[in-house]
């Protein structure tokens, strides 16, 4: 049926607006979470789509202390007891046979005087020891030149041999050797000559044995 407006004209109603068609929305699949290998006893906290894994802190046990080995203690070795009155054994005496290298009397007579360095070399001692013996024993009186150098005669060298014998082989003290020379000088001189002869003979035997063993 045709509709008329107020003035009698035909009225055509405006078409109703149509709502736009909604586009089909494709369903988006949820994101695939990567697979995580679960560690032993993790604690999981979910906040929406975010998962947080908290790993329990492992407290390392302190390593067992290794026992400290004590260092071996070296026990002191027993020392051999010394002989009575500091006397040396025959082995030590044999080792010291060649300590004195005084020429024989025939060789000594070739010169009137010998310097203190020559004499000290024969006895294998320091020159200071020769001067010390000179101060301690009245029988030892070498001559001196204008410079004060000591000059030893043959008789001075023989007295030095006697002093050396009493101190080194007889094991006398300085005071004991002085008293012995005052009371038994001739006896001490004879003993020194015998000891010197035995020393030379022993040195000869040791040298002969060394040559045979070579």
Image (spheres, helix red, strand yellow):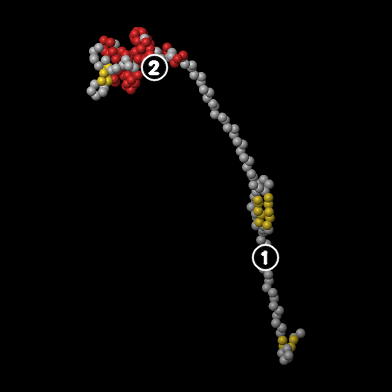
Query: Does 114 sit above or below residue 45?
Result: above
Q: Residue at x 54, y 29 (%)?
A: 71
- Relative to residue 89, is residue 53 drawn left or right? right
* Residue that mark 1 sits on: 25
Q: Earlier in the sequence, mark 2 or mark 1?
A: 1
Q: For residue 33, what is the image quadrant?
A: bottom right
SS class, disc 2: helix
Q: Nearer the viewer, residue 161 or 42?
A: 161
Task: Evaluate whether residue 98 shows in this view.
Answer: no
* Residue that mark 2 sits on: 175
Percent of width and height locating residue 4:
74, 88
Percent of width and height locating residue 77:
51, 21
Q: Nearer the viewer, residue 135 or 122?
A: 135
Contact flag, marks 2 and 1 (Cβ < 8 Å): no
Q: Nearer the viewer, residue 44 or 73?
A: 73
**Quick one: label 2, few (<14), some, or many (20+) residues within 10 Å?**
few
Residue at the right extreme of this rendering:
1
Report the Cα–Cα distance between label 2 and label 1: 133 Å
Query: Does 33 sit above or below residue 166?
Result: below
The quadrant of the image that shows the C terminus is: top left
Percent of width and height locating residue 201:
35, 8
Percent of width and height locating residue 144:
25, 20
Q: Residue at x 68, y 66 (%)?
A: 24
């Amino acid at each position: 049926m045709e509709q008329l407006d107020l003035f009698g004209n035909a009225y055509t109603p405006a078409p109703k607006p149509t709502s736009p068609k909604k586009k089909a929305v494709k369903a988006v699949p949820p994101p695939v979470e990567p697979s995580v290998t679960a560690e032993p006893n993790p604690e999981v906290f979910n906040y929406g789509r975010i998962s947080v894994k908290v790993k329990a802190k492992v407290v390392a046990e302190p390593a067992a202390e290794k026992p400290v080995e004590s260092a071996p203690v070296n026990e002191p070795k027993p020392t051999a007891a010394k002989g009575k009155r500091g006397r040396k054994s025959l082995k030590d005496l044999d080792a010291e046979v060649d300590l004195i290298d005084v020429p024989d009397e025939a060789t000594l007579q070739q010169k009137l005087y010998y310097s203190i360095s020559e004499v000290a070399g024969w006895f294998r001692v320091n020159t200071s020891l020769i001067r010390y013996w000179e101060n301690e024993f009245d029988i030892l009186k070498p001559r001196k030149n204008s410079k004060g150098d000591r000059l030893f005669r043959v008789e001075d060298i023989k007295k030095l041999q006697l002093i050396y014998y009493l101190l080194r082989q007889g094991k006398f003290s300085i005071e004991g050797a002085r008293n012995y020379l005052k009371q038994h000088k001739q006896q001490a001189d004879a003993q020194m000559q015998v000891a010197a002869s035995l020393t030379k003979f022993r040195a000869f035997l040791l040298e002969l044995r060394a040559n045979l063993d070579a």
